Amino acid sequence: MTVRAVAEWELWTTTARVVLDHRDRRHLAAAESCVREVTAAVDAACSRFRADSELVLRADELVRGAEVSPILAALVHHALDAARATDGDVDPTLGARMVSLGYDAAFADAPPVPAPEAIARALDTRPAWQRVLLSGTFLRVPAGVVLDLGATAKAAAADMAAASITARLGIGALVSLGGDVATAGPDPSGGWQVRVQDQDADPVDHVRIASGWSVATSSTQKRRWEQDGHARHHILDPRWGMPAEPVWRSVTVVAPSCTTANTMTTAAVVRGHGAVAMLRESGRAARLVAADGSVVRLGGWPAELGGWPAGETREPISTSAG
């Protein structure tokens, strides 16, 4: 069995993990440092759960419009791209709704920053995400809108962290932040082997991805809580501002970037029964686990991704949504 070099720690109520090929284990501490630096910068830029993050601290300025840091601009750009690509199914303007549904109280490590009261818009009836203005590093957020960049920001952090390791150390790396897995740099011996399973009782698949590719999983079974006797999960359907119908226990997609993969998995959960047609049209390799545990595999999953040849044993990198 090929044993990878692995470091992991708790982050954002999930697990952060960096994995290197066994030949590069001497670089593990430096690689971990790269991931910690990137995730700290992302957290400082856009966390809703700390009063000193740039997004929260400058909320009043952003109603008027202001220049923001390049990293915050990039994270907002990813979020708006995801909204455009999914016709608003992945909506970064649901922060106030998440607060009202009790997410912050259930999962924040510190008391959440109160969301501003929603302000009725007079003439502009476009969805809130279409009214967010980003031009270069100039950002304007409509009054009453609370940006929640969580999903795309975590995936973007995985992409950036893997790229940072390769740029700084010249080696291949896999970075996993909960259900978001990104790779960069030279392929390790045998490729990156990923075990896909959301919860212990869920079906298990193994896929092999080439370096530079990513895997993301979105789940309706994680980050669950109760509010006034009602079960909630964290993926909202923007049409109703309520958790999406749990047609799928989990959805996993392979794509050239973790941000793209995560956008597609989140949209698939929101679209429910329409997810299969959307993913089939995209041509991406995908796996959907239905509420009854049955599995739908699309786009050549997993055979065209390599799988594991009969008799081959390698240490898998596990991934589940976090």
Image: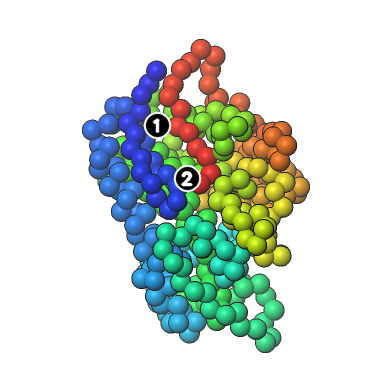
- 59 relative to 301 in the view: left or right: left
Q: Is residue 205 above or below residue 36?
A: above
Q: Quadrant of the N terminus?
A: top left
Left or right: where does residue 180 sit relative to residue 280? Answer: left
Q: Which residue is mark 2?
A: 178
Q: Please, what secondary structure does the residue beneath circle 1 have?
A: loop
Residue under the point 38% across and 24% down: 189
Which picture quadrant has residue 130?
A: bottom right
Q: Residue furthest top?
A: 311
In the image, residue 106 sits, relative to residue 310, either above or below, namely below
- The residue under label 1 is 187
Q: For residue 314, which numbered disc appears in the image?
A: none
Using the image, determine if residue 263 lies above or below residue 127: above
Toward the viewer: 238 or 157?
238
Which residue appears at 48% of the width and 33% of the height? 318
- Front position among marks 1 and 2: 2
In percent of width and height, residue 278 lies at 71, 48
Q: Amino acid at mark 2?
A: Gly
In the image, residue 153 lies at what x, y percent?
A: 47, 57
Q: Residue at x 61, y 33 (%)?
A: 202
Residue 250, can we see it? yes
Residue 258 in the image: x percent, y percent? 50, 47
